[in-house]
Image (cartoon, grey):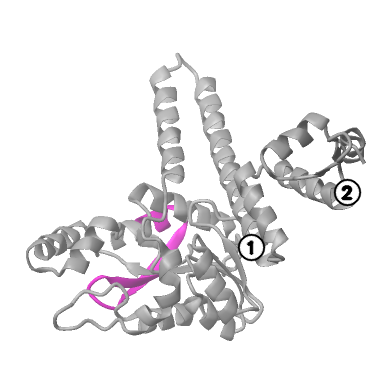
């Protein structure tokens, strides 16, 4: 068929078809006699695919990558691009909800008796802007795609050595076992593992009968996770915009991932976790991560590390944002949870949060 017939069949304009051709997304054959383009059923299918991906807001660059995955018969690669787009849409939805909340607060301020203090509106808008920037500014500076192949080896050989006393994953198995013990899933409960990596924590909960979902920002980590636990659902995503509806999970866990967030992002992450947790007296959250006990512990630890610490320890303190344990517990209390914790070593803690009765 010609371009007019193709456009009519698809319900799009001929101009849109030409645009997709210019971008290299479709390459219809040309008639030798007159140079006119001829569109086959395969071209129509490809245009339908492009239109569908554009409809969900996917960029032309990502569409090109997605089409390449389709051409190679790689359904998993296509799914990853769809998941990435879904994560983008959830981030936009979460931000829209926050904007609606801020607007309502402005309306409430305006309805108060007396003269409106415009500075309150300005402060409110500034707070909303800082939260938006915090949500948008996260990125993976550690390139976990490259670490996926050796991640399991790293965590299993994590004992400190005399010449290298600091290790991020010291007491790894002990901490994961504590997390599983405190969560104690009832068979059939829905759980979410944030920053699941290769699925080591989620896999233990699967063996306890939980229905596990894992999210991670690393495609390669998730590919390894799928190979290890094919019965587990995994998605691309991160703490700041969890790609799930409200009140989806009975419990949420995370291990060795929370410290990748800056302090203001950590607050947003806790709010997102609360959003996807079911509003139930049995819902629970368990965070296992490196944390300072309090600000005094942080200051003393950093001072000692600056003079006697090894290179890996000093780099970790520069690049990561180990939270304060007392601050995490305080934030969770504010959100309506009571907490308890256990300390595995000088920095590693497991924190359990359950709704305050």
Q: Give SS at disc 1.
A: helix
Side of 144 relative to 169 (left or right): right
Residue 89 in the image: state x and y as whole percent. 62, 46
In the image, 27 versus 256, the foreground residue is 27
Q: Is residue 17 above or below residue 61?
A: above
Viewer-nearest of discs 1 and 2: 2
The extreme front residue here reads: 33
Q: Residue at x 45, y 16 (%)?
A: 116
Residue contact at pointers 1 and 2, CB within 8 angstroms? no
In three-dimensional space, the C-alpha distance between marks 1 and 2, rounded to whole angstroms, equals 25 Å
Query: In the rendered structure, does residue 344 fall within the stretch colored magenta?
Result: yes
Find residue 337 and report its image quarter: bottom left
Can residue 229 be seen?
yes
Find residue 211 and report its image quarter: bottom right
Q: What crowding class fits label 2: few (fewer than 14 Cα within 10 Å), some (14-19), or many (20 or more)?
A: some
Side of 159 relative to 248 (left or right): left
Please name the residue that numbered disc 1 is placed on. Answer: 77
The extreme top residue here reads: 115
In the image, 196 versus 315, the foreground residue is 315
Q: Residue at x 53, y 64 (%)?
A: 219
Please name the residue that numbered disc 2 is placed on. Answer: 40
Residue stretch rendered in magenta on the structure: 330-351
Residue 341 in the image: state x and y as whole percent. 35, 72
């Amino acid at each position: 068929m010609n371009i007019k017939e193709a456009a009519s069949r698809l319900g799009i304009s001929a101009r849109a078809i030409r645009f997709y051709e210019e971008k290299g997304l479709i390459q219809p054959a040309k008639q030798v006699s007159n140079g006119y383009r001829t569109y086959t059923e395969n071209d129509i299918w490809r245009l339908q695919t492009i239109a569908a991906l554009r409809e969900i807001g996917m960029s032309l660059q990502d569409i090109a990558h997605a089409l390449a995955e389709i051409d190679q018969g790689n359904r998993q690669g296509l799914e990853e691009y769809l998941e990435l787009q879904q994560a983008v849409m959830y981030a936009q939805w979460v931000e829209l909800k926050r904007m609606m909340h801020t607007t309502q607060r402005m309306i409430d301020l305006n309805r108060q008796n007396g003269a409106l203090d415009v500075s309150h509106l300005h402060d409110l808008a500034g707070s909303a802007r800082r939260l938006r920037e915090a949500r948008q500014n996260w990125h993976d500076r550690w390139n976990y795609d490259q670490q996926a192949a050796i991640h399991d080896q790293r965590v299993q050989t994590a004992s400190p050595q005399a010449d290298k006393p600091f290790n991020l994953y010291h007491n790894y198995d002990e901490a994961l076992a504590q997390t599983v013990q405190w969560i104690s899933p009832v068979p059939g409960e829905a759980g979410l593992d944030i920053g699941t990596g290769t699925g080591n924590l989620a896999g233990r909960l699967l063996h306890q009968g939980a229905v596990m979902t894992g999210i991670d920002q690393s495609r390669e980590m998730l590919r390894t996770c799928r190979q290890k636990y094919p019965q587990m659902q995994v998605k691309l995503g991160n703490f700041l915009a969890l790609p799930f509806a409200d009140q989806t999970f009975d419990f949420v866990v995370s291990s060795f991932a929370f410290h990748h967030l800056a302090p203001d992002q950590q607050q947003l992450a806790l709010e997102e976790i609360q959003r996807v947790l079911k509003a139930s007296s049995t819902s629970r959250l368990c965070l296992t991560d490196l944390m300072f006990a309090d600000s005094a512990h942080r200051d003393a630890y950093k001072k000692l590390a600056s003079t006697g610490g090894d290179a890996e320890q000093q780099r970790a303190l520069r690049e990561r944002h180990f939270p304060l344990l007392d601050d995490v517990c305080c934030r969770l209390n504010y959100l309506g949870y009571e907490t308890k914790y256990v300390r595995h070593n000088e920095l590693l803690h497991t924190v359990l949060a359950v709704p305050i009765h």
